[in-house]
């Protein structure tokens, strides 16, 4: 909340009052004359002090009305009713009716300024009311206007990258990486580190700092020192049900496969008989290993691939996961069920394990890559041409990686859940 012009400080009024008492006690004729001259001025300053008090009270009232109106607008929007009408109605019920007595009540979606500028799941209410100018009109050209602003909403909008680590840099883009997701943000619970020819068109939201290196180009909004971002898939388990039958043969060739528990995992070498792997709808649990050579294509709709293996024994942080070169992952995640929105996940590895894609891979995945305890490294000429969401302890894109698709409406989950909160 603010005023449109600077107001007299109370400290000055106190000093003036002390001077007034000294003049009153002085009995000389010159002092009496001076007192007579200053009396109207003293009265004016007293009137100004009263006006300032009234303006301060009105400012608090306007802020309270803006807070309630923004919250109500967000609730109305989530319920599918008219948020603008609701926001203005709440403001009017608290004494600030749009268009009456010079009052303006603006209800905007998305917010036009602040940390949530452009985030479509948030509503901004701004109340402006001109103030009455009493005897203080003798000393100022015009009355100030009280301005109050509030923002409320659910979650933090669409998220294409979420780095969950609270230390270091949870999101790192380097070496000519391009991220063209104008309506889908990058979120980090620590630093965002962008260096060496990186181009980003989405909003950046960091729990700590945003580090911009050489020739970095940012066209979206940037916000630092943000509150902790909530993992949208928190509680999702990648552990294979113990009652599920074990398919003991590893997948070593292309072909068509059914969902289930593959105890021996997947190991596609360059000499495989068929380079196309067709996955029927369902959940695939791969244990032991997941290794892909060069030039393979994965296809599947309503498919979730779960990598259910921990760290390699005796080698903390290492897992039996390899993705070679020139592979295509054409997979669409399910839109319902316990793995809704998730195409690929691992929750059992710990100690910052590394899941790394090799060079020149095409990740045509509609859905999330979810690695909450590990680093997800998409390396060298990656082409992500659908809505591929990356949620991991650390997310790293490097060396000419490119993402191009906007994600709103694709079924992935945003940051922060659905609880409506007042944020500004």
Image (cartoon, rainbow, N blue to C red):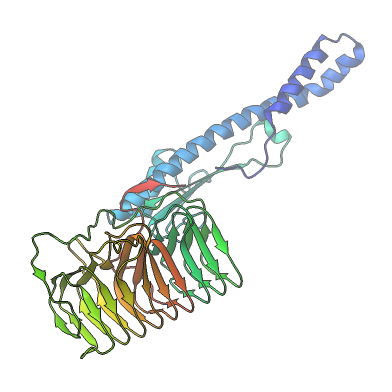
**Depth order, front residue of 238/183:** 238
Left or right: 231 as drawn, with respect to 115: left
Q: Is residue 358 visible?
A: yes
Residue under the image location 37 percent in, 83 percent down: 325
**Depth order, front residue of 301/25:** 301
Q: Which quadrant of the figure contains the N terminus? A: top right
Marker count (numbered):
0
Q: Is residue 295 above or below residue 248?
A: below
Q: Where is residue 241 in the image (x, y as percent from the top left)?
A: 13, 60
Q: Where is residue 326 in the image (x, y as percent from the top left)?
A: 36, 85
**Depth order, front residue of 233/371:** 371
Left or right: 275 as drawn, with respect to 138: left
Q: Can residue 44 be seen in this view?
A: no
Q: Is residue 60 above or below residue 87?
A: above
Left or right: 80 as drawn, with respect to 280: right
Residue under the image location 33 percent in, 57 percent down: 350
**Depth order, front residue of 52/251:** 251
Q: Is residue 293 above or below residue 50?
A: below
Q: Where is residue 223 in the image (x, y as percent from the top left)?
A: 51, 56
Left or right: 2 as drawn, with respect to 245: right
Q: Position of residue 39 (x, y in %)?
A: 78, 21
Residue under the image location 59 percent in, 36 percent down: 132
């Amino acid at each position: 909340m603010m005023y449109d012009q600077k107001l007299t400080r109370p400290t000055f009024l106190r000093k003036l009052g002390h001077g007034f008492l000294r003049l009153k006690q002085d009995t000389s004729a010159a002092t009496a004359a001076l007192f007579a001259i200053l009396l109207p001025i003293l009265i004016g300053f007293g009137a100004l002090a009263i006006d300032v008090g009234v303006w301060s009270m009105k400012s608090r009232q306007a802020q309270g009305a803006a807070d309630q109106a923004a919250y109500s607008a967000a609730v109305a929007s989530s319920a599918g009713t008219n948020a603008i009408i609701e926001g203005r109605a709440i403001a009017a019920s608290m004494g600030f009716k749009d268009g009456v007595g010079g009052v303006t009540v603006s209800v905007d979606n998305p917010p036009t300024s602040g940390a949530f500028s452009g985030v479509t799941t948030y509503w901004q209410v701004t109340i402006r009311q001109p103030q009455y100018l009493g005897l203080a009109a003798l000393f100022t050209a015009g009355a100030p206007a009280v301005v109050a602003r509030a923002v409320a909403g659910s979650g933090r909008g669409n998220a294409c990258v979420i780095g969950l680590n609270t230390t270091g840099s949870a999101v790192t883009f380097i070496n000519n990486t391009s991220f063209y997701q104008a309506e889908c943000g990058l979120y980090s619970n620590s630093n965002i580190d962008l260096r060496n020819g990186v181009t980003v068109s989405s909003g950046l939201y960091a729990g700590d700092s945003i580090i911009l290196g050489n020739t970095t180009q940012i066209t979206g909004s940037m916000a630092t020192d943000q509150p902790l971002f909530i993992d949208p898939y928190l509680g999702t388990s990648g552990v294979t049900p113990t009652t599920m039958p074990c398919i003991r043969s590893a997948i070593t060739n292309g072909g068509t496969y059914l969902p289930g528990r593959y105890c021996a995992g997947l190991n596609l070498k360059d000499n495989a008989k068929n380079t196309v792997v067709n996955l029927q709808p369902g959940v695939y649990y791969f244990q032991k290993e997941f290794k892909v050579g060069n030039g393979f294509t994965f296809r599947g709709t309503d498919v979730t691939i779960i990598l259910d293996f921990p760290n390699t024994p005796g080698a903390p942080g290492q897992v039996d996961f390899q993705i070679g070169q020139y592979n295509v992952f054409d997979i669409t995640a399910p839109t319902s069920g316990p793995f809704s929105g998730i195409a690929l996940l691992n929750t059992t590895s710990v100690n910052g394990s590394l899941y790394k894609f090799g060079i020149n891979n095409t990740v045509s995945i509609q859905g999330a890559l979810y690695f909450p305890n590990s680093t997800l490294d998409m390396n060298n000429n990656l082409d992500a041409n659908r809505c591929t969401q990356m949620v991991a302890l650390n997310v790293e894109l490097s060396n000419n990686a490119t993402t191009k698709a906007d994600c709103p409406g694709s079924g992935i989950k945003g940051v922060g859940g659905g609880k409506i909160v007042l944020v500004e």
